[in-house]
Image (cartoon, grey):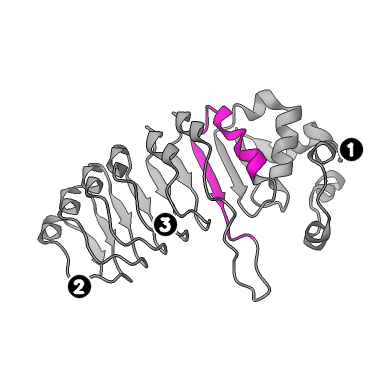
Amino acid sequence: IAAEANLQEPQSHWQSSAPVPLTYKLKERALGAPALAAFCLADNRLNLDVYLDGCRRFLQLFEGRRGEVLQVEFLRLSSNDRLLGTTLDILPHLKHLKSLVIKGGHARDEFGSCQHGSLTSLPADMGNLRCLTHLDLTFNSLSTLPSCILHLSSLRVLLVSHNRLVVLPEDFGCLSKLTFFSAMKNQLKDLPRSIGDLAVLQDLDLSENALEFIPEEVGNLHNCTELDLSGNCLSSIPDSLGILETEAGY
């Protein structure tokens, strides 16, 4: 109980503390990696987004329990963390990752509004995570979709809502196993025609964007049962959508 209490730092202390060298951060706790692992690492899962200093904890675990961390299959981090950049450099080594969540919205400004996370890109070699099926980058500062995502051959769920995306890559349709894609509340103005190549896509949420045009190729999404185009600037929709058995909002 005492050890767990020691792990939970008050928010006011964390926010007011001055920047500390990483070498100190990794060794500042007498608690150590074994005790950290007992609380944070279980069943190949690391849920560190609940901590204000989750990335520091991750780096400490990686230093002290590297073998176990490399076996992690499910990882959650906050992108409001100031050590996120250092942590991202390690993620391509987690070859067993199946689910990765790097979300913002954990911090609030003086008006009480959720702050977008600092994530603007991903390391190129993250495209080598062949086991990754679920990627959640919600509530961040992405203006373009990181190119490494297009190399995630097993990806089934991609969540990039509440970012600043203006366009999707022309070859977005190469994500052949994608079943669920959400890009709600971005700034998308149009869609690549290759989106029609997502043959197994079942759920597509493009609500609250700036879309003025939907390509006819969307009608090729024969497995799509949920389509949300609400909150856009559409004056018409393509005739090809009429053949889809969807629950659309537009």
Which is in the foreground here, disc 1 or disc 3?
3
- Choose top left, top right, bottom left or bottom right for residue 243: bottom left
Residue 43 appearing in the image: no
Q: Residue furthest right?
A: 30
- Give amino acid for label 2: Ser
User: Which quarter of the image is occupied by the C terminus?
Assistant: bottom left
Q: Which residue is mark 1?
A: 30
Percent from the top left, x then y, of residue 213? 22, 63
| Residue in view at x 31 percent, y 53 percent | 203
**In the displayed structure, does residue 55 sit left or right of residue 244?**
right
Q: Which residue corresponds to the image point at 46% horizontal and 28% vertical from the top-left?
A: 128
- Graded by Cα atoms within 10 Å as few (under 14), some (14 to 19) or many (20 or more), the crowding at tag 3 reads many
The residue where tag 2 is placed is: 235
Task: Report if residue 101 lies within the magenta region.
Answer: yes
Q: Amino acid at mark 1?
A: Ala
Mark identifier at residue 165: 3
Structural crowding at the residue carrying mark 1, measured as other residues with C-alpha within 10 Å and reported as few (<14), some (14–19) or many (≥20): few
Q: Are marks 1 and 3 in contact (CB under 8 Å)?
A: no
- Looking at the picture, tell me which residue is in the foreground, 14 or 148: 148
Whole-angstrom CA distance, mark 1 to mark 3, is: 43 Å
Residue extending furthest toward the top:
67
Note whether 151 is above or below 135 in the view shown.
above
3D distance between C-alphas at marks 1 and 2: 62 Å
Q: Nearer the viewer, mark 1 or mark 2?
A: 2
**Span colored in magenta:** 85-106
Mark 2 surroundings within 10 Å by alpha-carbon count, few (fewer than 14), some (14 through 19), many (20 or more): few
Magenta run includes residue 47? no
